[in-house]
Amino acid sequence: MPKKKNKKRGIKKQKETAIQQIVNYYFHTKGLSLNQIKNNAKKRKIIYSRFTRPAKQLLELAGSIRAAKKAVSKVAKWAKSRNLDYAIETVFKKWLELDRLKPKEIVKKPFFDDNPMIWSATKKKWYVIRDDGQWLEFAGQESEIEWRIIK
């Protein structure tokens, strides 16, 4: 592996291997910077070597660094949309489904006065559902409906 010499500081800098690139990218999708990864590895919060074998297997399976990173990104986006934690091994488990993995759709639900609402397509009316389960016909304006994101 060729080493580059930094003329300013006289420090030898090693080129990042393909496996290191994949491991570091995996941690990047988890929200960690390279400095955080290094610090956590020094403090033994991350056992870096534990991730090299699955990264090598992923590289072999994907065929290229780019394809491996794309697979990690796809799984990361899918898992985060469902508030799931994911490991690098999750990419293997989901490999055959990668093309079908879609992030969870963000759904907005209607509310009025902190009560959920429902649209009746047959009656073409909005109903407010009270805490006791009773449905009341909504007599207000559509501008009074509050739309909330429900996860």
Image (spheres, rainbow, N blue to C red):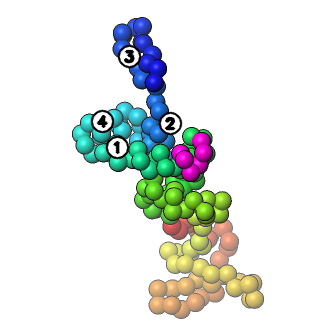
Secondary structure beneath dot 3 equals strand
Quarter of image, res 45: top left
Sequence-wise, the earlier of marks 4 and 1 is 4
Q: How many neighbours does mark 3 have within 10 angstroms: few (below 14), some (14-19), or many (20 or more)?
A: few
Tell me how far mark 3 sits from mark 2, CA to CA. Answer: 19 Å
Which residue shows up at 41% across the image and 47% down it?
53
Residue 20 in view, yes or no: yes
Tell me how far mark 4 sits from mark 1, CA to CA. Answer: 15 Å
Residue annotated with mark 3:
12
Magenta-highlighted residues? 59-64
Q: How many neighbours does mark 1 have within 10 angstroms: few (below 14), some (14-19), or many (20 or more)?
A: few
Residue annotated with mark 4:
39
Tell me how far mark 1 sits from mark 3, CA to CA. Answer: 22 Å
In the rendered image, residue 1, in percent from the top left (x then y), is placed at 45, 24
Q: Which residue is situated farthest in the top direction here? A: 7
Q: Is residue 69 above or below residue 130?
A: above
Secondary structure beneath dot 2 equals helix
Which residue shows up at 44% across the image and 37% down it?
20
Q: Is residue 12 left or right of residue 74?
A: left
Tell me how far mark 4 sits from mark 3, CA to CA. Answer: 20 Å
Q: Does the magenta stretch include residue 149?
A: no
Q: Tag 2: residue type?
A: Ala
